[in-house]
Image (tube, rainbow, N blue to C red):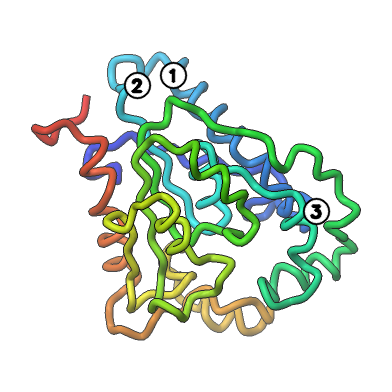
Amino acid sequence: MAQQGFIVAAPNHPGSTSEDESAADTFKFWLRPADLTETLNALEKEPFLQNHLDADRVGALGFSAGGYTALAMAGVRMNPQLLAAYCDTDIRNPYMCRWARKSGVDLHTMDLQLVGRDNSDKRFKSIIAVDPGPSDTFATESYENITVPVDLINLGRAGEFPPTLDASQIAKALNAGDHYATIQDAVHESFLAECKTGAVEGLKREKLPPLCDDGGGGRSRNEIHAQLIDGAFNRTLKPSDGALQ
């Protein structure tokens, strides 16, 4: 994205990011949007960027739980009751819910008072959500609040991706069918960085999910990333002459 002229910031989420994560903090999805807001606040105050930022062309792109985070900038909220019941069975998300139980996390006993709050930030003018999750806990009535362009992408074949990551129903609610796409030769993990040599074997040894697997379509992960990048932001955020300020 930076090579295409965008200024890119990739914030971490304390307690829910690589090498700093716990099940209890990871399930506090409603805390994540503030990290985007504070990141933008910091960028706007950074002297080096003062002559380069364009406040009318700010977008948020998120993957998986980050998909919710990006959508929250546009006004999507979570439903506290649906989140509390999320791990009543393992059907929705076996890996996450087993991790929660192993860690002693009971969503029914968590303080969920702030789950349904509005975290929107009107400075974000375009949203891309890839496999947004957990989409089956979103408050559907909050879709009515969205006024900015939203592009939704699912990785995989229609009907095969997990319901908790299904963005097609969001697209229908937003009447945004033209801005919903699937990448059929990808899987959920295809959004992650390209894997280093030996990573596949290391994941197997540690009994971790197959984070290096793609959809078997023959394309490299780098090629899949290129398709993801060449999308909505080029249409919604770049000036008509293609030059960013």
What amino acid is at disc 2?
Answer: Ala
Name the residue tied to disc 2. Answer: 55
Q: Residues within 10 Å of mark 2 (few under 14, many from 20)?
A: few
Q: Residues within 10 Å of mark 3 (few under 14, many from 20)?
A: some
Q: What residue occupies the far left of the structure in this picture?
A: 241
Q: Which label is found at residue 44?
A: 1
Q: Which label is found at residue 214?
A: none
Cα–Cα gap, marks 2 and 1: 9 Å
Residue 118: quarter of image: top right
Residue 219 image offset from top left, x and y in percent: 27, 77
Cα–Cα gap, marks 3 and 1: 32 Å
Towards the viewer: 221 or 82: 82
Whether label 2 touches label 1, CB < 8 Å: yes
Residue 150 image offset from top left, x and y in percent: 37, 46
Residue found 36% across the figure and 31% down from its top: 58
Cα–Cα gap, marks 3 and 2: 35 Å
Q: Which label is found at residue 24?
A: 3
Whether label 3 touches label 1, CB < 8 Å: no
> Mark 2 or mark 3, which is nearer the start of the sequence?
3
> Mark 1 or mark 3, which is nearer the start of the sequence?
3
Residue found 25% across the figure and 39% down from its top: 236
For residue 53, say whether it is visible: no
